[in-house]
Image (cartoon, grey):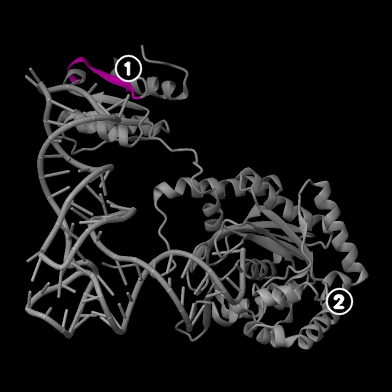
Amino acid sequence: MLKKPPGIEDIFPDAMEKWDHVTGTARDVFRTYNYKELIIPVMEYTEVFARGLGDETDIVSKEMFTFEDRGGRSLTLRPEGTASVVRAYVENGEYNRLASCKLFYCGPMFRAERPQKGRLRQFNQFGAEFFGSENPYHDAEVIGMMDAISRRLALAPYAVLVNSIGCPDCRVPYTEALKSFYTSHSARLCEDCARRLEKNPLRLLDCKNESCRALRAEAPVITAFICGACRDHHDRVKGHLSQAGVSFTEDPFLVRGLDYYTRTTFEFVTERLGGQNAFAAGGRYDGLVEQFGGKKTPAVGFAAGIERILLMLGDQRAPERRLDVYIVHSGGDALALAARTAAALRERGIAADLDPDAGGFKSQFKKADRERARLCVIVGEDELREGTRSIKDMGSGEQASVPADAAADRIGAMLKGSASLP
RNA sequence: GUGGAUGUAGCUCAAUGGUAGAGCCCUGGAUUGUGGUUCCAGUUGUUGCGGGUUCGAUCCCCGUCAUCCACCCCA
């Protein structure tokens, strides 16, 4: 049997109902904030991610699906959305001329990690990006948007962690302070952290190792190092969040795994994802557009993991989908009329189905039941002879016949609730 | 990349050193054109793959692959 590669999933119709519920809710909320959807490519030149996310990040250095095209150019399946959106924004002359713009996307991302609970190699995200202002209002709006989606999907309990990692200028002295603090306590660091100390000191704060965590409690805090402008920005983000009624927790140790963030960073976290804890995260990236060759354009955005949200939804039922009409027939000439009836219903936007090979009425009604059909239309010998169609309400079990040419209208009215069986 | 667990019917799982069962699902039936409940009957497996021990392995051992979980990292 042919199998799918590891960490990749098929999504069958029964799961689609919950899937649509999640993405539909996100789209609805995005629209209420005047964000507009765009579709970005699934692959980019490798450089887009290498430059965008940072060469030294784990995602770029060891988690990308990279291959060469026939011309020997290096392509990569996108591991996240922001770099692509920024590239598209900079490349599109019409959009980057706008004073500001609000975009959102939804689609698959790829990372060559070992799969586990809440972590796949092909997974889906929806995310939003705002371009064109460093006003802290927008930081709060983006966070508020994800909070609104979370509330609508009833994802509670979850927490919103917020921090500021300052601008590149004020991060330098902080990184130095962090380095010297950890260097003087290097004996208490785990192996991984010894490595982080050299490569990416900020990530020292993220370690889950007990002794490192204990050490962190005494570590220098970023809030003591950020410059006046960054502090003011951060305070105003928090002010807007409070005003918007978003309950959040300040976490001075929240750092992110991508190099492009400046100032605001945030994460939506929950206990219910096994080893993972974040189901959405983002922040501000004021330097990225310029780095991609555009004019200096401050921006802020986030991305959310759809499969992780699905996990949080658990057994919560999404609204179930039912078939409007199942058509039961007795074969032969009746099949032709049954097909015509189905066509007439579909013209009216009514979902109808039938089985041309159907045996007895019994098995056809069983199928109707399995499809959770609201109504059945019966086209059999009696109906053929009398020029009628019988309509059965599968909920009540009641049945009546109507003239053949009035059947489709009658059914349409019944499904809308404006008519009942005669 | 590292560590742990698990691989038996389509699904969820039993069982025993002597070539496997249950429930669900599916199909058919319970007086010939009527479902959801009930009852009856029936179909399905090279027990993940390869090797070893043994008279004999699904069960024991080794390898391999796959899946899951955790670390790393991240949505």
Q: What residue lies at 63% left-to-right and 59% top-to-bottom?
A: A127
Q: At which x and y percent is residue A227?
A: 90, 72
- Which chain's residue wears label 1? A
Image position of B63 with respect to A252: above or below: below
Q: Is residue A340 magenta?
A: no
Q: Residues within 10 Å of mark 2 (few under 14, many from 20)?
A: some
> Is A338 displayed left or right of A132 in the figure?
left
> Is A348 displayed left or right of A152 in the figure?
left
Q: What residue lies at 68% left-to-right and 47% top-to-bottom?
A: A148
Q: Are marks 2 and 1 in contact (CB under 8 Å)?
A: no
- Quadrant that contains the C terminus of chain A: top left
- The residue carrying mark 2 is A170
Nearer to the camera, A54 or B59: B59
Which amino acid lies under the numbered mark 1 shown in the image of this protein?
Glu
Q: Is residue A393 magenta?
A: yes
- Quadrant that contains the N terminus of chain A: bottom left
Q: What residue lies at 16% left-to-right and 34% top-to-bottom?
A: A359
Q: Residues within 10 Å of mark 1 (few under 14, many from 20)?
A: few
Secondary structure of the residue carrying numbered label 1: loop
Image position of A399 with respect to B72: above or below: above
How far apart, in angstroms, are the residues tagged by discs 2 and 1? 75 Å
Dot placed on the residue nearer the N-terminal end, 2 or 1: 2
- Which chain's residue wears label 2? A
- The residue carrying mark 1 is A398
Which amino acid lies under the numbered mark 2 shown in the image of this protein?
Cys
Quadrant in which residue A228 is drawn: bottom right
Nearer to the camera, A39 or A325: A325
Magenta region, residue range: A384-394
> Is A205 displayed left or right of A71 in the figure?
right
Q: At which x and y percent is residue A4?
A: 36, 67
